[in-house]
Amino acid sequence: MRYIVWSLIAAFLIVAGLWPAAATPIALAGAGAAAVIAAIPGPALALIAAAVWLKYRPAPARTA
């Protein structure tokens, strides 16, 4: 039982110690994406969204 407890404590310390280092690149990528999106004006984003929607809009359903 003592070995199991020590193994669980060691696993917890490894996970708790490595999680911030593993999550940092994800947080930095999110911050970078937010900065890029914030740099583009709103009307330009709306125009891009409309163009993408027109290009990939679903085909109308055929009636019988």
Image: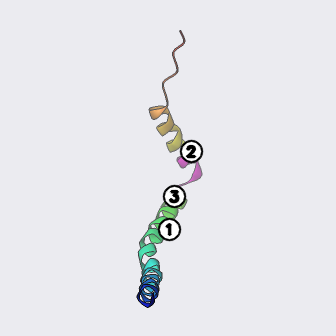
Count neighbours of disc 2 (C-alpha within 10 A) and say few if under 14, some if 14 to 19, many if 20 or more.
Answer: few
Of the pair 14 and 18, the residue shown nearer to us: 14
Q: Position of residue 24 (x, y in %)?
A: 45, 75
Mark earlier in primary sequence (3, 2) = 3
Instruction: Report the disc number at residue 31.
Output: 1
Residue underneath mark 3: 37
The magenta segment: 40-46
Spatial CA distance of label 1 from label 2 is 21 Å
By secondary structure, the bulk of the magenta-drawn segment is best described as: helix
| Label 3 vs 1, first from the N-terminus | 1
* Position of residue 11 in the picture relative to residue 38 (left or right): left
- Which x, y percent locates residue 23? 45, 73
Q: Earlier in the sequence, mark 1 or mark 2?
A: 1
Q: Is residue 43 magenta?
A: yes
Q: CA distance from mark 3 to mark 2?
A: 12 Å
Query: Is residue 33 positioned above or below 4 on the image?
Result: above
Q: Which residue does the image show at 42% across and 81% down from the upper left?
A: 18
Q: Mark 3 falls on what kind of element?
A: helix
Q: To which residue does mark 2 refer?
A: 46
